[in-house]
């Protein structure tokens, strides 16, 4: 037992103290647990959102390496390779063409799968049924591909083999897999069929391929084992894919989301530290007399510090443990339903250890202070009194309720506690306001998509039509206001081994309305605008010239402006399509369509699709960041609880200071109601000051802070919004109301209680 | 005498710094020797430095200059934790305002010093049961201090001070806050432990209380102005302390 370890006298005191304040102790544990749960849940969602591969791969026991061979490989040789734990397949695979809606032909890859789901590299059935020998015409389609094509269980699945024969199959189910990337980033799309069905579609063995998956004990040895496998199979291997490529294809490059979550994580930690420091500090303050008594009995400074550290630290650590368990339950049961995998050990440990450190530091300071209490059990230092009756008389004179005056005077008589109370309210309030600023920023993304480069709600690809025909059809639509010709290409930039996205949209004379945040829009051929991420990557500034290579053609452009760029972490160069070489620019690959204000993009899309056009709808960054909203709400709740808990502590402390005053006030003839009003004013005034201060600072900072986040994420400064006045006013109003209600609890109790004039 | 004195203070000085930075001399060059088993009362008007002196003797406050020897060992040079260890082993304190630990039950309060001194929980419990029995508080063991009357609280405080069988009992106006019946109870207890050989230094401004002591030291403005043993004359039916007479 802990008490045995730290000496039974200390243990005895800790137990007695915990027993004396069960409710408060429980609140502390729950607050810390809430923060830890929120942090872990947020990190889990983030990881799952940005790295879906991990979850899919884990759940399906995916294969780390896929070997594509012409003929069936020597499975036992592969299995006996060092480090290979399991082998998936070998499965036959054949290319085919799928007849999609409106006569489109989409290349697909058919892959053989057993009727019983395999143990390794198991597709994860998400809808419908798995393959069944009794229904050989049934296929299971990879989910992202099915989504893109519009397939559902029961949909017809008409495939044409290389020999030209057409087979009408049916979609039996949809499944996910961690063994290949999402469509369309990873093409062709994938469908699983039974062996017999595959043979029917592609009877020629020469045109099929064999894929074999290897699951490894240590993913770090992937490259080595690939070499060995290729060597073992004596040049049989045509192509290899590894888990790294799959993961990279699936990963969402969303630095902004990560940064915002990081910001909230830090806010949560600060809040936890604040809450604990406040609770511990408040408790120690109310106990100074007892601590002095303990010292007069022979407790040393170190013993007192250790005792407080153990007591309050244990509460914090218990909160962390509870939070970890609660987060585990939430991810396992609530989120597990939707296929979210638990957080990987790294971030999990970081959060747990991080909060533990924060807890200990936050508790250590008041504990240390408590240890320095002098052993003289002095009569508690009474707050300066004396002008009480004169002030009361003055208040009566100007017809102010005396309770208000007395309360207002009380609020500031003890400076340090007053300051602590104000901070204890202001800091959570500030962070709540910043959270609201993030919310407003997301709202702004949605309300003004043109502000984040999404003036064009739709992008239409000509498909089988000529560019001119496409343009005509598009412009005929009543909702389409403008159609900008565009092309997206990969460009090599100096000093980089990888390519960056180059987006040509509109012409120099009639540029697409990019949201320019700095500098100006391009006006001439050879001019371009860039996102912050690209400027950072190249170490360039607005006004610099850069030399890029597109498809072998060198191009020198001058960056004349910086635009808000939510895609590709801001690593995008945008220019007029006339700046490109003719081979890349003509005909335009797509048209960006600006719709009339108020038009419904979904409807316009449906109309255009009905005309045989391939239309993609832009995904608003706010939708990708939707998880942030959940976290903002959770954080606001936790922060509000922390602020209120701080106020409760302050109220209890104020009461302790006022036991004597209360007797005096009652003797002076104040009614219980007036006494209550005095106490509420005392704490309430500080709370109001804290709320207003926090709200103002938060509103001023949120914009700058979000812009800072934007800058570091590559999107670029200029996205940040302060909370709307209405939002801010509501938040401040609710906070003040709640604060007054909380201040009322101890005040009511005190006003009702019969206060003995104790001799202390 | 050849025995080592229980306390020897040599030219003890304590100067407080008042709020405005002015020095406030509370104890000004006190020389005091207390023999083992002696019961010394310190008397003097309010503000004469009685509390300050007894706090210095128990190490609750640091001296400005001078020496303190307890049981023949120099104590004034001890660190704060050195004093703490000394207190838990050798000194019991009783204060005017009882100073019980508010969170803990009566039983816990009394067991605390024994536990702190390293006694086993069982031994601490036995000692507590014995002391509370002696003081007639057995049935209040589970009560919180706030539920007790002032006299009961002070008796608990006394039990706590005696829990470790300290060499020295320091008491600062232990009856200052009690009515006459409770005062009598507490004083009875004090004289009983004194008869058992307990060394006691007691601060009071009540002559009746001082009358119990072997010796009365009078303090005025931080200086000892009188120090003399008491002769008791027992009249028929009179209790100890009825008549006080200063000798020499
Ligand atoms: N902490 C302190 N700071 C400043 N002055 C003090 C302090 N404690 C006591 N004094 C002063 O020292 C003098 C002696 O106080 P004290 O020992 O409490 O007297 P007594 O107990 O005899 O009433 C008084 O004048 C008092 O004001
Ligand atoms: Mg005194």
Image (spheres, rainbow, N blue to C red):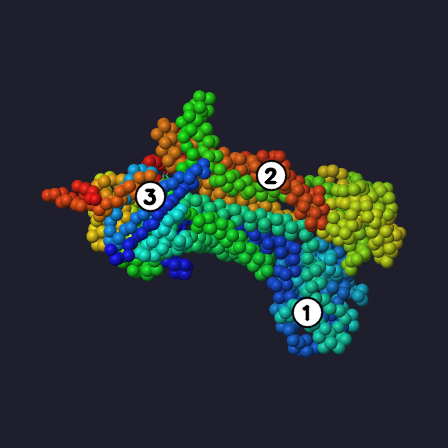
Q: Residues within 10 Å of mark 2 (few under 14, many from 20)?
A: some
In the rendered structure, the answer to whether residue A365 lies left or right of residue A487 reads left
Q: Tell me how far mark 3 sits from mark 2, CA to CA.
A: 50 Å
For residue A735, the mark is none
Please state the horizontal and vertical placement of residue A31, each as a whole percent of the image: 49, 49
Please state the horizontal and vertical placement of residue A410, each as a whole percent of the image: 45, 33
Residue indicated by mark 3: B51
Instruction: Assess whether mark 1 and mark 2 are in contact (beta carbons under 8 angstroms).
Output: no
Residue at 75% over, 67% down: A94
Q: Residues within 10 Å of mark 3 (few under 14, many from 20)?
A: many
Toward the right, the furthest residue is A582
Nearer to us of marks 3 and 2 is 3
Residue indicated by mark 2: A697
Residue indicated by mark 1: A222
Q: Nearer the viewer, residue A626 or B175?
A: B175
Residue at 65% over, 57% down: A51
Please state the horizontal and vertical placement of residue A522, each as a whole percent of the image: 83, 43
Q: Residues within 10 Å of mark 1 (few under 14, many from 20)?
A: many
């Amino acid at each position: 037992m802990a008490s045995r370890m730290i000496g039974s006298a200390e243990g005895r005191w800790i137990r007695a103290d915990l027993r004396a304040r069960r409710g408060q102790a429980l609140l502390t544990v729950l607050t810390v647990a809430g923060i830890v749960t929120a942090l872990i849940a947020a990190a889990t969602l983030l990881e799952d959102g940005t790295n879906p591969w991990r979850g899919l791969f884990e759940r399906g026991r995916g294969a780390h390496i896929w070997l594509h061979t012409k003929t069936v490989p020597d499975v036992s040789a592969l299995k006996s390779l060092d480090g290979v734990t399991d082998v998936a397949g070998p499965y036959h695979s054949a290319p085919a063409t799928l007849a999609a809606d409106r006569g489109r032909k989409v290349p697909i890859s058919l892959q053989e799968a057993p009727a019983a789901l395999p143990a390794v590299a198991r597709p994860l059935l998400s809808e419908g049924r798995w393959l069944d020998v009794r229904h050989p015409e049934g296929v299971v389609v990879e989910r992202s591909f099915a989504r893109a094509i519009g397939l559902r269980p029961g949909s017809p699945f008409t495939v044409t083999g290389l020999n030209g024969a057409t087979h009408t199959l049916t979609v039996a189910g949809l499944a996910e897999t961690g063994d290949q990337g999402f469509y369309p980033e990873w093409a062709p799309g994938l469908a699983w069929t039974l062996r017999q069905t595959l043979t029917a579609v592609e009877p020629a063995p020469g045109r099929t391929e064999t894929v074999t998956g290897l699951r490894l004990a240590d993913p770090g040895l992937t490259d080595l084992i690939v070499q060995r496998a290729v060597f073992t199979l004596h040049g049989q291997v045509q192509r290899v894919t590894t888990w790294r490529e799959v993961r990279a294809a699936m990963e969402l490059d969303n630095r902004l989301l990560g940064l915002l979550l990081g910001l909230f994580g830090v806010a949560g930690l600060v809040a936890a530290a604040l809450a604990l420091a406040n609770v511990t500090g408040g408790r120690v303050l109310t106990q100074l007399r007892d601590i002095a008594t303990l010292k007069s009995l022979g407790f040393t400074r170190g013993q007192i510090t250790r005792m407080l550290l153990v007591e309050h630290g244990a509460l914090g650590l218990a909160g962390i443990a509870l939070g970890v368990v609660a987060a585990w339950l939430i991810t396992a049961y609530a989120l597990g339903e939707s296929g979210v995998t638990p957080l990987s050990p790294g971030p999990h440990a970081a959060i747990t250890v991080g909060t533990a450190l924060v807890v200990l530091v936050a508790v250590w300071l008041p504990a240390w202070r408590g240890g320095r209490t002098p052993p003289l059990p002095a009569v508690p230092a009474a707050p300066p009194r004396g002008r009480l009756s004169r002030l009361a008389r003055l208040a009566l004179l100007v017809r102010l309720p005396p309770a208000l005056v007395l309360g207002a005077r009380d609020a500031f008589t003890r400076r340090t506690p007053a300051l602590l109370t104000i901070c204890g309210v202001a800091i959570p309030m500030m962070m709540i306001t910043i959270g609201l600023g993030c919310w407003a920023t997301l709202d702004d993304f949605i309300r003004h998509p043109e502000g984040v480069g999404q003036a064009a709600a739709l992008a239409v690809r000509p498909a089988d039509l000529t560019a001119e025909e496409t343009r005509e059809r598009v412009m005929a639509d009543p909702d389409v206001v403008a159609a900008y010709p565009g092309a997206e290409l990969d460009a090599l930039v100096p000093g980089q081994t990888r390519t960056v996205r180059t987006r040509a949209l509109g012409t120099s004379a009639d540029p697409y309305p990019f949201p320019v945040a700095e500098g100006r829009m391009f006006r001439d051929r050879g001019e371009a605008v860039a996102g912050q991420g690209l400027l950072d990557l190249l170490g360039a500034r607005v006004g610099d010239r850069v030399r890029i290579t597109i498809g072998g053609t060198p191009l020198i452009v001058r960056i004349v402006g910086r635009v808000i760029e939510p895609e590709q972490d801001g690593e995008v160069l945008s220019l007029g399509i006339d700046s490109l070489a003719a081979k890349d620019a003509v005909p335009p690959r797509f048209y960006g369509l600006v719709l009339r204000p108020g038009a419904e993009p979904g409807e316009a899309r449906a109309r255009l699709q009905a005309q045989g056009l391939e239309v993609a709808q832009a995904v608003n960054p706010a939708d990708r960041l939707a998880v942030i909203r959940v976290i903002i709400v959770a954080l606001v709740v936790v922060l509000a609880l922390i602020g209120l808990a701080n106020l409760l502590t302050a109220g209890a402390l104020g009461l302790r200071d006022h036991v004597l005053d209360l007797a005096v006030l009652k003797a002076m003839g104040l009614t219980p109601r007036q006494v209550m009003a005095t106490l509420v004013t005392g704490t309430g005034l500080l709370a109001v000051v804290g709320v207003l201060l926090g709200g103002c600072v938060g509103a001023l900072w949120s914009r700058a802070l979000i812009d800072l986040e934007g800058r570091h994420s590559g999107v670029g400064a200029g996205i940040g919004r302060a909370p709307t006045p209405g939002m801010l006013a509501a938040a401040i109003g609710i906070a003040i109301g709640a604060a007054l209600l909380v201040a009322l609890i101890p005040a009511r109790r005190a006003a009702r209680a019969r206060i003995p004039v104790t001799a202390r | 005498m050849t025995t080592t004195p229980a306390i020897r203070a040599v030219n003890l000085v304590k100067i407080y710094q008042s709020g405005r930075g002015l020095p406030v001399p509370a104890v000004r060059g006190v020389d005091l020797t207390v023999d083992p088993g002696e019961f010394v009362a310190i008397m003097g008007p309010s503000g004469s430095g009685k509390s300050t002196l007894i706090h210095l003797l128990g190490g609750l406050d640091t001296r400005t200059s001078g020496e303190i020897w307890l049981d023949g060992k120099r104590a004034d040079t001890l660190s704060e934790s050195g004093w703490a260890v000394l207190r838990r082993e050798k000194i019991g304190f009783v204060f005017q305002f009882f100073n019980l630990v508010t969170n803990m039950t009566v039983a816990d309060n009394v067991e605390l010093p024994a536990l702190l001194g390293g006694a086993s929980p069982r031994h601490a419990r036995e000692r507590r049961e014995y002391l509370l029995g002696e003081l007639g508080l057995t049935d209040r063991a589970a009560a919180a201090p706030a539920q007790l009357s002032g006299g009961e609280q002070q008796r608990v405080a006394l039990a706590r001070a005696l829990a470790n069988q300290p060499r020295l009992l320091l008491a600062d106006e232990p009856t200052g806050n009690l009515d006459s019946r409770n005062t009598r109870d507490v004083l009875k207890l004090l004289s009983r432990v004194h008869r058992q050989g307990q060394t006691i230094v007691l601060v009071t401004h009540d002559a009746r209380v001082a009358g119990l002591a072997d010796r009365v030291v009078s303090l005025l403005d931080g200086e000892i102005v009188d120090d003399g043993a008491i002769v008791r004359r027992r009249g028929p039916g009179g209790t100890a302390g009825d008549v006080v007479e200063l000798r020499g």
